[in-house]
Amino acid sequence: MKACLRQKYGPPETFQIMEIPKPIPKPNEVLVKVIATTINRTDIGVSTGKPYAIRAFAGLFSPKIQVTGTDFAGIIEEVGKEVKDFQVGDRVWGFEDNGAGTHAEYLAYPISKAILKMPREIDFATMVACAEGAHYAINFIKKVELRPGMQVLVIGGAGAIGSAAIQILKARDVKVTAVCFEEDVEKVKNLGPDRVIALEKEDFTKELAAYDFVFDSVGKSRFSICKPVLKEKGVYISSELGPNWENIGLALKGKFTKGKRVIFPLPLDILDSLKTMQKLVEEGKFKPMIDERHFTLENALEGFAYVASGKKKGNVILHLA
Ligand SMILES: NC(=O)c1ccc[n+]([C@@H]2O[C@H](COP(=O)([O-])OP(=O)(O)OC[C@H]3O[C@@H](n4cnc5c(N)ncnc54)[C@H](OP(=O)(O)O)[C@@H]3O)[C@@H](O)[C@H]2O)c1
């Protein structure tokens, strides 16, 4: 079978598209024919081994799993002898943020990890686009005590995390203002926020004490810049560590602070995120943002370069079949 491989940590140019043996599922694994997966920012982190903290999970000196890819949607072709809850022919999707080797025509995946049967009416690309960015958005949002009517600012509405965050927050009945570049305003409006700010036209940092929660989904701001726009007990969360990993230190300090504070959540419980997303999709409350550019294994390295550029819109689909 064909797959995208990296033997060492390094930039996407060093990855190779190769023929490798089709995996044989272990007793607790299912063999999935992968139909769609994404190339995402987690793939870039896991594949390049940066930030270095990621190597504690993905492999200290070289990647534990050589095939790239973290998420998948596909069809079960074989089940291991201990597998009871899944059958051949089931349409399934899953995500593993430390890497799962999903950029391959076939994947042997343990059922102890995050995997769910897909709803019949949802297509593979749509389903897989509900995994990575949405998982982080859910985990960051659930650290904040939201009440209906609260004002939330989402910086980076056109990213995978930001586009998911806007819709997840709207399903929680809060008022969402999204920030993006002018060229993305129409796309972001389609996600249903109450207001969209075009970065080039309006300066959100001038909106003093306007927000209960600022969520920088692209990690381009700092707490010091956003602090004035927060209300008295407002919370700031960024998806990035910030300069000199300042968001970790600020989050520790925030544990002892009563006023405006930083939280830096560790995203956990992937299965719960998948269940939440599947429910929102089934209820028609979530439609993932999918980039206009689609890739196959033949041009996957181009896809990696595109994602690493920080220019993608929402989720980039890699079609395997
Ligand atoms: N903490 C964690 O566990 C974790 C996990 C995964 C990812 N991350 C990090 O989270 C960040 C976001 O990931 P993602 O996949 O959502 O990103 P993404 O999809 O790559 O975001 C790209 C989009 O963000 C827009 N953008 C860039 N700078 C912006 C700014 N200053 N204001 C508003 N929009 C801006 C870009 O617009 P243009 O194309 O117009 O430039 C592009 O549309 C990344 O830095 C990633 O490394 C953190």
Image (cartoon, rainbow, N blue to C red):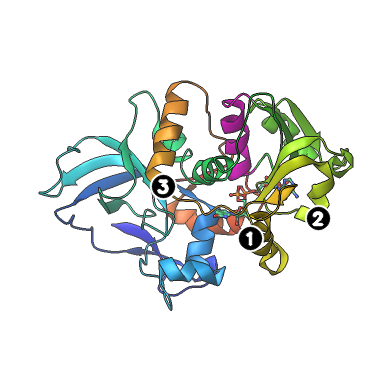
The disc at residue 224 is 2
Q: Which residue is mark 3?
A: 269
Ligand 1 closer than 8 Å to the CB at disc 2?
A: no
Amino acid carrying mark 2 in the image:
Ser
Say if mark 3 contacts mark 2, CB within 8 Å: no
SS at mark 2 in the image: helix
Q: Earlier in the sequence, mark 3 or mark 2?
A: 2
Amino acid carrying mark 3 in the image:
Asp
Q: Which residue is mark 1?
A: 252
SS at mark 1 in the image: helix
The residue at 53%/29% (across/down) is 287
The residue at 21%/35% (across/down) is 89
Q: Position of residue 154 (x, y in %)?
A: 70, 39
Amino acid carrying mark 1 in the image:
Leu
**166 inside magenta stretch:** yes
In this rendering, position of residue 4 left or right of residue 88: right
Q: Nearer the viewer, residue 88 or 230?
A: 230
The residues colored magenta run 159-173
In this rendering, position of residue 215 left or right of residue 132: right
- Count residues near mark 2 (Cα–Cα under 10 Å), then give few for <14, some for 14-19, many for 20+: few
The residue at 68%/32% (across/down) is 188
The disc at residue 312 is none
SS at mark 3 in the image: loop
- Quadrant assignment for the C terminus: top left
